[in-house]
Image (cartoon, rainbow, N blue to C red):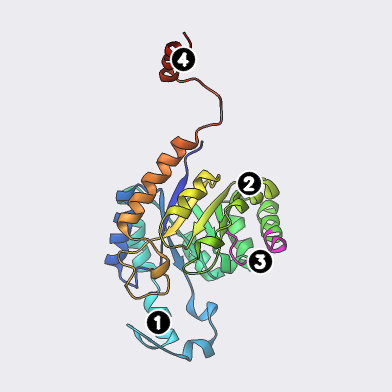
Amino acid sequence: MNRTFIVAEIGINHNGDLKLAEKLIDTAVIAGCDAVKFQKRTIDKVYTQEYLKEARQSPWGTTQRDQKEGLEFGKEEYDKINNYCREKGIEWYASAWDIDSQKFLQQYDCKYNKVASAMLTNDELLTEIAKEKKYTFIATGMSTYEEIDHAVEIFRNHDCPFELMHCNSTYPMPIEDANLKLIHTLAEKYQCKVGYSGHEAGTLVSTCAVAMGATSIERHITMDRTMYGSDQKASIEPYELCSLVKDIRDTEKIVGDGEKILTEAEKAVKVKLRG
């Protein structure tokens, strides 16, 4: 079995605090993750002015704009994140929610790109990402086969390598909605690797996804689920992340390669029991 690519999704769980972001990166490194992921938005491009004026209480103020801007990192923070991840020896990348954000991310020459489920039907953004020809993880939450077909066509037309990610976009996701058999269905239908992006409580579903053939696992992480933030409750805490990575690596060993082979230990038992 190939090694599962494990991504710790920091997203916006850093709450606009670079020190907290660094703690989350440290957590991912200690757990043995392959990468950490963030989210990048240009506030005035992603949201309407009317929406940004709406009332919303947050640690940063009383409007939607205050909250969105409070959660957003700029060049100064991403420069430091880029350097910090290099020092720690872990890959990082981000899902862009608009063209300007994708162009902003290009300056860091990250190894990977990510299409968030919410962006799967944004042809202009998908084309901008596909033109980079970097390995791209494409989340499929909220999407029909027709919408996935179209996204896949864009990436194949640009010869951009990609991996679909089975995903249910509820936060947190009830485990009965996991539908992990879809991993195999997507792999057969699109003839590509298929990972799993989870938003459920706990780690069992994610471990099961590996046993079902998921080639990558992405989970939101947090230092504490009771912290402020819309994604915190659907995230796993440091001890859970460490447990998940260990369970995934053990699952890889358990699943094996499907070949019928007698181990040396089993051969010894065979001699004893069959003569």
Camera-side mark, 3 or 4: 4
- Nearer to us of marks 4 and 1 is 4
Check the image and report above or below for 101 versus 165.
Answer: below
N-terminal of the pair, mark 3 or mark 2, is 3
Disc 2 versus disc 4: nearer the observer: 4
Asked if labels 3 and 1 touch by Cβ distance under 8 angstroms, the answer is no
Q: Do the residues labelled 4 and 1 touch (CB within 8 Å)?
A: no
Asked whether the viewer can see residue 254, the reply is yes
Secondary structure of residue under mark 2: loop
- Type of amino acid at the residue the image marks with label 3: Asp
> Where does label 2 land, which residue?
192
The residue nearer to you, when weighing 34 against 98, is 34
Disc 3 crowd rating (10 Å Cα; few below 14, some 14-19, many 20+) is few
Q: Is mark 3 on a helix, strand or loop?
A: helix
Residue type (three-letter) at the residue carrying disc 4:
Lys
- x%, y% of residue 23? 28, 60
**Number of marks in the image?**
4
Which of 210 and 136 lies nearest the eye of the viewer?
Answer: 210
Q: In terms of secondary structure, where does tag 1 sit?
A: helix
- Under mark 2, the amino acid is Cys
- Residue 67's tag is 1
Query: What are the residue bounds of the magenta stretch?
Result: 138-148
Cβ–Cβ below 8 Å for labels 3 and 2?
Answer: no
Residue 236's quadrant in the figure? bottom left
Kind of residue at disc 1: Gln
Query: Disc 1 versus disc 3: distance between alpha carbons?
Result: 28 Å
Kindly identify which residue carries mark 4: 270
Q: Which residue lies furthest to the top in this view?
A: 275
Which residue is tagged 3?
Answer: 123
* Element carrying mark 4: helix
